[in-house]
Amino acid sequence: MSILAKGEAHIYPRLGPIHEWDIAAGHLILEEAGGSLFQADTGAPLRYNTESLKLPPFIALGRALGPVPLNVSL
């Protein structure tokens, strides 16, 4: 996430399992730097503090690629 926040990368797809505590701080830093992060299958924002504490696959975008796309279909 830090290379996205610094503008050294443009996209990071995370399609494997990950827990919310592994990504929450990076998510905040990325958004503060102008990037975005959304669910890969729906384009919806990630939801934290769910029962399983696991996050669905997501895509992170650096600020150069603009805001969160709506209704993404991959």
Image (cartoon, helix red, strand yellow):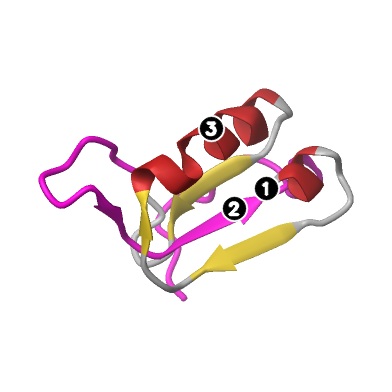
Disc 3 versus disc 1: distance between alpha carbons?
9 Å
Dot 3 or dot 1, earlier in sequence: 1
Say which label, 2 or 3, has the lower sequence index. 3
> Badge 2 local density, few (<14 within 10 Å), some, or many (20+)?
many
- Magenta part mainly helix, strand or loop? loop
In the rendered structure, which segment of residues is drawn in magenta? 45-74
Q: Are marks 2 and 1 in contact (CB under 8 Å)?
A: yes
Q: Residue 47, which numbered label?
A: none
Of the image marks 2 and 1, the number of the one nearer the N terminus = 1
Kind of residue indicated by mark 2: Ala
| Image location of residue 38, percent across then percent down | 46, 50
For the question of whether residue 54 can be seen, the reply is yes
- For the image, the number of numbered tags is 3
- Residue on which the image places disc 2: 60
**Place of residue 64 in the rendered image (x, y in percent of width and height, measured from the top left):** 81, 45
Kindly state the secondary structure of the residue where label 1 is placed: loop
- The residue positioned 39% from the left and 41% from the top of the image is 21
Which quadrant holds residue 5? top right
Q: Is residue 72 magenta?
A: yes
Residue sitting farthest toward the right:
8
Q: Residue at x 85, y 39 (%)?
A: 6
What is the three-letter code of the residue carrying label 1? Met
Q: Nearer the viewer, residue 46 or 43?
A: 46
Q: Which residue extends farthest top?
A: 32
Decide which of 67, 33 is in the foreground and name it. Answer: 33
* Residue that mark 3 sits on: 25
Instruction: Categorize mark 3 by other alpha carbons within 10 Å: few (<14), some (14-19), many (20+).
Output: few
Give the spatial CA distance, label 2 vs label 1. 8 Å
